[in-house]
Image (tube, rainbow, N blue to C red):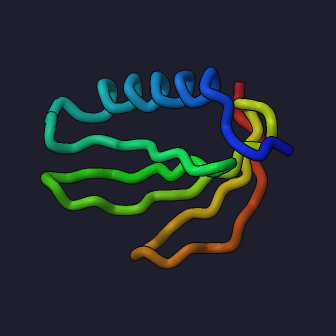
Amino acid sequence: MAKSIPEQIRKQVDELVKVLNQKMSKDPHCFYTTKFKGAYLYLDRVDYDVTTHICRLKFTGRIDNWEFAIYLDNVRLPQVTVSAWS
């Protein structure tokens, strides 16, 4: 298990989120953002300056396999592990 997310993985994730933003919304005031802290990636949604926490992902050493916790109304749900789909 990785102690922190390598820079190369961070760049790949940021690029994936950039593509997601381009496909999901044409409104420049509505977008997803990433924050990295240690082995965690925090995904937030910004809608006209209102930030909503979406989920926290834990890097497990591979870009296609993360543990995650989903936030609903800023309450964190139990953590589960998933693998990326092809």
Q: Closest to the observer: 66 or 10? A: 10
In percent of the image, x 71 and y 66: which residue is there?
A: 79
Label total for image: 0
Q: Is residue 52 left or right of residue 6?
A: left
The quarter holding residue 77 reads bottom right
Q: Is residue 76 left or right of residue 2?
A: left
Residue projecting furthest to the right: 1
In percent of the image, x 57 and y 30: which residue is there?
A: 10
Q: Is residue 48 above or below residue 73?
A: above
Tell me residue 26's x, y (percent): 18, 30
In percent of the image, x 33 and y 51: which residue is there?
A: 45
Q: Is residue 21 left or right of residue 79?
A: left
Tell me residue 19's x, y (percent): 40, 23
Q: Closest to the observer: 57 or 2? A: 2
Q: Is residue 25 above or below residue 48?
A: above
In percent of the image, x 21 and y 44: which residue is there?
A: 30
Task: Give the quadrant of the N terminus.
Answer: top right
The quarter holding residue 62 reads top right
Tell me residue 72's x, y (percent): 46, 72
Task: Give the quadrant of the C terminus.
Answer: top right
Tell me residue 42's x, y (percent): 51, 52
